[in-house]
Every structure is written in structure tokens, then in C-alpha cells.
Image (tube, coloured by chain):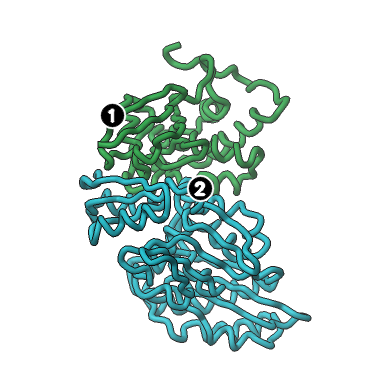
Chain colours: A green, B cyan
Amino acid sequence: MAEVRVTVDGVNYADEVEPRMLLVQYLRERLGKTGTLIGCDTSNCGACTVHLNGQSVKSCSVLAVQADGGEVLTIEGLARDGQLHPVQAAFNECHGLQCGYCTPGMIMAAVDLLGDNPDPDEGEVREGIEGNLCRCTGYQNIVRSVQRAAQMMKPGASAPTETPAPVAGD
Amino acid sequence: MIPAKFDYVRPSSVEEAVSALQQGGDDAKILAGGQSLLPVLRLRLAAPSVVIDLGGIPELRQISEDGDRIAIGAMAPHHDVLRDDLVKQHVSLLSQATATVADPQVRHRGTLGGALAHADPAGDLGAVALALDAEFVIAGSSGTRTVPAAEFFVDYFTTAIGEGEILTQVRFPKYTGWSTHYEKFNRTAQAWSMVAVAAALRVEGGSIAEARIGLTNMGTTPIRATGVEQALVGQPATADSVRAAAEHATEGTAAPSDADAAADYREHLAKVLTGRAVLAAAG
């Protein structure tokens, strides 16, 4: 067993884990953070995307012990004070999902992309989310959602046309 | 699937890592960025008894200028290589090829040294290292040795890194002012190269003074297209002369046939992509 000390969505955890435990397993099975999904389990689909120390990673391709001492942000930690993150709100507004399975990973990849490039053109959005697959092939609205989010996140931008929905459970 | 059980160590120096590797024997495996190793472990294509994580050795991530070389730590993530101004200025071909590796998430974790040590012939960075005559610094129990790229890639997934040794740094000569391009051919996002061509040219007064061409996935190792290089030197960078030189691209290759492409199609691609890469580099 190995010890892992990690901050996940702002909360500190210390756990004994088997070295072979994947980060996605740790998040889902140990911490109950099932908002992060397992899709392909072969590091293609990106459904399990979370941020580790501020960068998007596929959590099926990181060992939990590799996150030791680090900071993880999952889809569950994105909303603040009962308000959806602008990327979540934009996916809602632009219907950037069909079945929804890829959505948590898409949103985490999009947040990372917009951190690097606050105003991506369509091609840059498509490249930025190339690590995430949508089996419904609903890419049109996903790309629109990311570009809408970029507008919403511009300094001085007006609030989204619709007030973001309150977070479920709040 | 999840990996088979293994012991995990995270040394804080290269010396500790080398000694852990020697204690682990045949069954030990080095973990760099894990973007190839973890899928392999999950599919249980490998089941090492001990995994030695180099992630606890910060100096292995450094990128620095060392005289007429740019020295890149083996654990520098692709994302860092891509953003590095020294690399952009002096080894632009490496920046261009790194931008095509996998996807952003994989580039955040995957490392230059890990990819080169893995030595997948479809990997994009080997052809660059070979074309640019990079040097590989390898640490073992008796110190370090330096291996030129021409001797580093031995066979399919096999390099000159010996048992008990660790790749610590890759050193690229500076190609400041050279014109470069990496032309990759694949069918879908984040897919491996079916074939790709790395081209670096020194153009003088409209004609090609020096050329360095590396091929990805045209054999069991990256391949240097010396026939193309020789045919290009002294020629103007025009479409006709470049295409004529690109006809030499299959010399010395042994293209694989697999589910992506048959060997003869790869040979066709090698010529076409060599032409495109050289013309794009020449601008």
C-alpha cells in the first residue's frame, strides 16, 4: 500500500491505496466522485478528464499515487456558490450534449482550453477537444458551447442571456 | 481493466532511481509520463513487479541552453517542450512534431524522454531526434554515457538503453534559422501517424544548402532519408525539384503492413509527404 495525500475539489484527503489504483478509480470508488466517468478505459475517449495541478489529464491514465501532493479539480468542483461555471452554463444554453456521457470530460477539457486560449476560433476549439470523443457525434453544439463560454468569460462580458441554472441540490 | 499488482517507488534522484532499477532486476519498469505505460499495464500486456516513477526528480524536467545545444530533461512533458522559447527558436522541428502528438491531456502528462525510450516506430519524435542528430544521455551505475541518435533506435520498441540504465536527457544541436516542417498523415484526431516526415532545411539564396529528413513509421525504427537529403542539396526549393528528390524517400525503408495501411501505400505516402514537408518547410 502507498499513501496518497491529495486535494480534490478543495477538500484535503489522505488515504492508503494500492499503487495500481488509477486516479479515476480513486475519485469514483474511494471519494464517491462519480461525476467523473469512465468511458473507454484505454485513454482514448477523455470521458474521465479532470485537472491535476491545473492541467487537464485523463484520470484513467494516471495512478492515484502519482497525484500525491497534488490538487485535483473534477466536474463536481467546478460550480461556485451555487452557480454553474460559465462553461457548464454554456453547454446548458447551447445544448452541447446529447446522451451526456462525454459531457463532464468535454467540459473539463474546454475549461483547460479556455485557460490557455481565451478566444479560440472554431478550428482551435476542435483541436483543443481532440482528446475527447462524443459517441453521439454531437460536436457541432459542443464547439458552439465552448465558443459561447469564451464570450461569457471575457472580462466585462455581460451575464449569459439566461441566468445559469442553480446547481442541483442547492 | 486495472493493472496487475506492483510495488511502487518514487526516487528523488537519478542515483536512487538507478539503484532501484538494479534492485528490481528484469521485472522493474520505469514510469515517465505513463501515457504509454499505463495503457499497457491496464491491458496486462506487461506486469512488472516494481514500477519506478521518475516524477519525483524535478531536474529531469528542465530545458536549458548548453553552449551549442538545447538540453531537454527526459521528463519534460510534451506541453512544456511545446511552450518553450528556446526549443521554438533553435529546434523548431521538435516543437512542430510535438504539437501533433496525441491530444492536450496526453501532452500534459507524456514526456519527451518517455516517448523516445518507448521507441514506438509510429511515434512522432524519433524521426525528429534522428534527423537532427540529437544525443541521448543515459545514466547507469557507472555514471553517464552519451549515445548518438543514429545508434539509439535499435529495433521495434528497442533502444540502446541497457538493463539498469535510465534516459536522463536529450540534447539537440541548435538549428537556428533553419526552415522546418513536420508533415503527419493520419485519419482521425489523436491517431498515430500512418506515415510522417520530419524536414529541416538550410536555405541559402533560394537553393537548399543542407537538408535533414526523418521518416516516421516506415520501418521498425525511425529512418533517415539520406537519399532525399543528397538529392535536395544544391537544388532550388521548387515543386519540380523537390518532388524529384522525394522519389528517393523509400530507399532503405521497410514499411510495415497493418490495419491502417499496406506497405505499398505507405511507400506512396512517404514520397508524397516528403514532397509536402520539404515544400512547406521551404515556405
Using residue B142 as the reference point, say whether residue A10 is left or right of it: right
**In the image, residue B119 above or below residue A78:** below
Q: Is residue B118 visible?
A: no
Q: Secondary structure at mark 2?
A: helix
**In the image, residue B267 above or below residue A111:** below
Give coordinates of residue B142: x percent, y percent: 38, 67
The chain under label 2 reads B
Location of residue A57 by image quarter: top left
Using residue B67 as the reference point, say whether residue B30 is left or right of it: left
At 27% from the left and 48% from the top, the residue drawn is: B42
**In the image, residue B172 above or below residue A126:** below
- Circle 1: is it few (<14), some (14-19), or many (20+) Cα within 10 Å? few
The residue where tag 1 is placed is A29
Q: Which amino acid does the dot numbered 2 rest on?
A: Pro
Is A158 or B60 nearer to us in this picture? B60
Residue, far right? B205
The chain under label 1 reads A
Give coordinates of residue B248: x percent, y percent: 52, 86
At 31% from the left and 57% from the top, the residue drawn is: B21
Q: Which mark is residue B104?
A: 2
